[in-house]
Image (cartoon, rainbow, N blue to C red):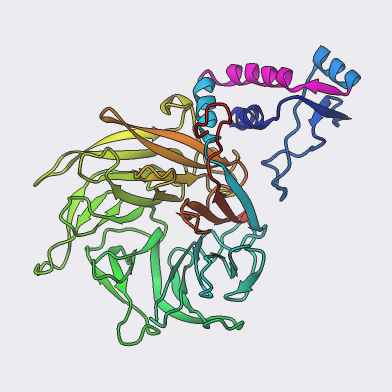
Amino acid sequence: MLLNILLNEILELIVHLPDGDVRLTQFALENGEKTIIIGGFTRWPWSDHRDPTMVPATRLAGRAHEEATKQGSWPMTHIKQILTCLALVLNPWYPMALLADEQHVNYVFNRMQLSDQFYSEGATYADLNRDGSADVISGPYWYAGPDFTERFEIYDPKPFDIKGYSLNFLMFAHDINRDGWQDVLVIGHPGKEVHWFENPRGGSKLWSKHLIFDVVDNESPTLSDLTGDGRPELVFHTAGQLGYAEIPQDDPRQPWQFRAISADQGYTRYNHGLGVGDVNGDGRADLLEKNGWWEQPTAASTEENWQFHPVEFSKAGGAQMFAYDLDGDGDNDVVTSKAAQSYGLAWFEIVAAGESIAFREHTIMGDLPEQNEYGVVFSQLHALAMTDMDGDGVKDIVTGKRFWAHGGRDPGGRDPAVLYWFQTVRDDGRVRFIPHRIDLNSGVGTQVVAGDVNGDDRPDIVVGNKKGAFLFLQRAPSVDQQTGQSQ
């Protein structure tokens, strides 16, 4: 675990340190070691600081240390050479990991930390005040776009201790009462109530709160048009039964009615893994869960329960699950993290269709560097999103590490809270996933949302978690002045 942390820091320095000479400052640690501080910053990115501009200290010893402190500056190329040697010692797959980071520089994000308080592990975006600019919604606040510097309360703010949990796991925006204003749906702690907050139509007062359902289980419920009627349903399970709740047509302020699609599966409130997508290509959305998929019947069917197709997508259960044609062969594959509290990311290729659909599992990232083509590994993928990040017409995967989910007790729980997107590349019949690191000190919560927030036709990313609220705005790719090619 410590080696992974150190390697991440070394990679961060190699990729992002500038060229030329950098002024160095020396100070003595308590144990008497000498430390070279690049740019005068002294704190590590995984420590609990709130300044995203901090750059980690780099220790140089022996003759290099003496020369640097004597001259007062050190050629950056020498520092990078030393760091590269350290990276090769720590991880023999380092060259591939570095290649991934070299690809990452093509896609640059402006990092905006909107809050440093733990209010929720969910966040989303929508135009709440109807001014034509999307706003960011995280916890009790919405941050007015396009600058996101002014915030307004939705409900009474109450920060939570990062050693515990919030009462806000996921957030969705939708015009629930059909008045032309986007409302906010908040999924609380698993097994608790779910409410929606009614937009005051531009007023400054707190939003009216309405109960949707009193016991919503699973850690990744979703708001999605499961039935295909053009209106979203709340998809979850309760009392062990999978199903959905519909918005009441006569009075949306009344509790929503739950419609079960399965018998009692014995699932508890903390069950992991859930999604919606058309698995068998019949034009009807199906329900995905860790143990398989539930086939939506035709409208004429009189069957009470949907047909279950067992597939062990994830033994422990992941997070959000998706059905999407990754390999471009015309049928939808399944994407899921393997364990929300541990390691693993995979896609399941449909290899046989028709009456009996069969899958072949492909590992995107495991629990060891050698299990990823680029040597990338991190744990606790408790939130996933899919969108076309690079504009090539194929959806990519956005995920990251959930920060401090259980006080650092999970596998890799004390590693850096990274945020990544995996670029889907179809290559001569196979699919590759090129990892692009977006950030090293934010991660995800139990939700990550990707979409065009600022209206520039490039997907951005919204995160709320125990480190605060974040917005990552994607910038246009830079252009190499010599070749004229995108970088």
The segment highlighted magenta reads: 72-92
Q: Measuring 54% from the left and 22% from the top, which residue is drawn there?
A: 94
Closer to us: 393 or 163: 393
| Percent coordinates x, y for residue 84 in the rendering | 63, 19
Residue 39 in the figure: left or right of residue 398: right
Relative height, residue 198 to residue 486 (above, below): below
Q: Residue at x 71, y 26 (%)?
A: 19
**Lateral position of residue 37 relative to residue 176, left or right:** right
Is residue 35 on the magenta stretch? Answer: no
Q: Position of residue 34 (x, y in %)?
A: 84, 24
Residue 42 vs residue 71, the one in the foreground: 71
Instruction: Residue 90: tell me if it is visible.
Output: yes
Confirm whether residue 290 shows in the render: no
Quadrant of the image occupied by residue 316: top left
**Residue drawn 72% across the image and 44% down it:** 53
Front one among 148 and 142? 148
Residue 332 vertical position relative to residue 89 in the rendered view, above or below: below
Question: Front-most of 482 and 168?
Answer: 482
Residue 466 is situated, as x and y percent measured from the top left of the image, at: 60, 55
Q: Which residue appears farthest toward the right when viewing the image?
A: 70
Residue 164, located in which quarter of the rendered image? Answer: bottom right
Secondary structure, magenta segment, majority class:
helix
Q: Is residue 66 above or below residue 447?
A: above
| Residue situated furthest top in the rendering | 63
